[in-house]
Image: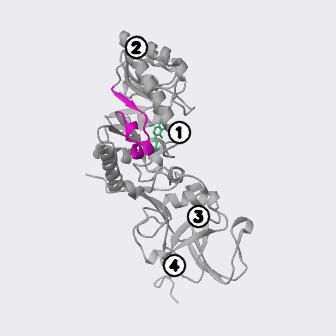
């Protein structure tokens, strides 16, 4: 046989098709924009902040931030100053708050880039005042009160002193208190008694700030669960993250469709190998799965380096050849196996790990349930090795 004129092309190469050749995350920006519009409607009267920290919960920060702005997000929020400065470097010019600061952080760069900053403690206010003096600008600061989360924020005992110090800095012209804010501990468990308790402390803190002479533009405490379930917590601004990406904060809050939300990320892979194996064949490290009979195994080329949780070993759901399959044996760094039972598939066929769910595929919430975590973590942990393809960007 003449191998030059009659090459035996591999099956996958003979059937080129759109989509990733190994694994890829499709990010539907039209869904993201629709989610932002639905959330704005629900928060009627309050402004909306799209939280785009952690690479927009794994969805790609810059394209998601752009799409959120197109859909009318007046504010963006990040955890770190580096994230905020990257948004400015990419051309974003709207209101933008970042809240996770450590001593010696890039205060001056943030102030010069017109980024709103946050202070939970006098040390932060002192550094802000120093940076504002050094660059001759007025820093926009959001003072954070710990109403009960026990994470960042000023304890109520120190609040009067913090607000007084901020007022003095306003008089000097170095600071403008643009916001007073806090964060919930259990808003994803509607009815939890800590919610009302935190709201009461927040109202107290607002009254104290007013007595100190502060007049913040925005008072804010609501994250996604509070934006979705607790109108009295909306105040002037809601800070929505996970809901922008079309996921529900928790099963107790509801499913995304209840709120007109649609998951934005679909994670697809292509089968790398499909083969028949005999009964009693061990599968993957540790042989935690053994084929119950002669069967067909399919190799999915995505692993924990791509963000597929190793805890999904033996439990993660995947749509392959028209049915939900379960990860057979351990998830390895780069690959895992599914048992197709009596069904067949070909190399290059698609495996859908999760998506909106309307083509029968699992959702990120299904993965969260299988693994014992939350949808937030499933999308945010998708690895840097996975290419993101952003669909439906507006011209
Ligand atoms: C991450 C974060 C949010 C967004 O929370 P979601 O539950 O994803 O809406 C809001 N505020 C702060 C301070 C956060 O850290």
Q: Residue 220 in magenta? A: yes
Q: 24 or 152: nearer the eye?
A: 152
The picture places residue 268, in percent across and down from the top left corner, at: 47, 64
Q: Is residue 162 visible?
A: yes
Answer with left or right where residue 110 lies relative to residue 273: left
Above or below 27: residue 90: above
Label 3 sits on residue = 316
Give the mark nearest the N terminus, 2 or 3.
Answer: 2
Q: 9 or 175: nearer the eye?
A: 175
Label 2 sits on residue = 167
In whole angstroms, how far apart are the C-alphas of marks 1 and 4?
53 Å
Question: Colour scheme in the image?
Answer: one colour
In the figure, residue 217 lies in which quadrant?
A: top left
The reply to whether dot 3 and dot 4 touch (C-beta < 8 Å) is: no
Please provide the residue range marked out in magenta. Answer: 217-235
Mark 1: which secondary structure? helix
The picture places residue 9, in percent across and down from the top left corner, at: 49, 79
Give the mark nearest the N terminus, 3 or 4.
Answer: 3
Residue 193, label in figure: 1
Q: Residue shown at 62%/61% (left/top)?
A: 312
Residue 346, label in figure: 4
Answer with left or right where residue 373 lies relative to residue 329: left
Answer with left or right where residue 355 lies relative to residue 303: left
Give the mark nearest the N terminus, 2 or 4.
Answer: 2
Give the mark nearest the N terminus, 1 or 4.
Answer: 1
């Amino acid at each position: 046989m003449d191998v030059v004129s009659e090459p035996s092309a591999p099956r996958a190469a003979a059937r080129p098709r759109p989509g990733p050749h190994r694994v890829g995350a499709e990010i539907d920006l039209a869904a993201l924009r629709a989610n932002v519009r639905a959330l704005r409607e629900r928060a009627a009267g309050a402004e909306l902040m799209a939280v785009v920290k952690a690479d927009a919960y794994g969805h790609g920060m810059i394209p998601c931030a752009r799409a959120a702005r197109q859909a009318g997000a007046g504010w963006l929020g990040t955890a770190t100053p580096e994230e905020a400065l990257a948004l400015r470097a990419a051309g974003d010019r709207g209101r933008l708050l970042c809240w996770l600061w450590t001593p010696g952080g890039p205060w001056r760069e943030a102030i010069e880039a017109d980024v709103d900053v946050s202070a939970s403690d006098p040390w932060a206010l002192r550094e802000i005042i120093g940076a504002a003096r050094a660059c001759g600008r007025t820093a926009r600061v959001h003072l954070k009160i710990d109403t009960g989360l026990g994470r960042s924020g000023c304890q109520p005992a120190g609040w009067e002193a913090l607000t007084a110090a901020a007022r003095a800095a306003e008089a000097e012209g170095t600071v403008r208190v643009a916001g007073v804010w806090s964060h919930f501990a259990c808003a994803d468990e509607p009815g939890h008694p800590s919610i009302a308790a935190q709201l009461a402390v927040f109202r107290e803190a607002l009254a104290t700030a007013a007595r100190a002479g502060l007049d913040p533009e925005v008072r804010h405490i609501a994250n996604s669960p509070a934006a979705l379930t607790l109108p009295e917590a909306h105040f002037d601004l809601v800070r929505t993250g996970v809901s922008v990406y079309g996921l529900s904060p928790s099963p107790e809050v509801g499913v995304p469709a209840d709120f007109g939300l649609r998951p934005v990320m679909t994670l697809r892979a292509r089968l790398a190998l499909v083969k028949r194996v005999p009964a009693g064949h061990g599968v993957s490290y540790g042989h935690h799965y053994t084929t119950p009979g002669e069967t067909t195994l399919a190799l999915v080329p995505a692993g924990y380096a791509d963000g597929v949780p190793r805890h999904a070993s033996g439990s993660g759901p995947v749509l392959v050849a028209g049915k939900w399959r379960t990860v057979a044996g351990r998830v390895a760094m780069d690959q895992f196996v599914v048992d197709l039972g009596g069904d067949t598939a070909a190399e290059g066929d698609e495996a859908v790990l999760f998506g909106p769910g309307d083509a029968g595929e699992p959702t990120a919430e299904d993965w969260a349930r299988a693994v014992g975590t939350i949808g937030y973590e499933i999308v945010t942990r998708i690895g840097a090795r996975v290419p993101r393809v952003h669909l439906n960007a507006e011209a």
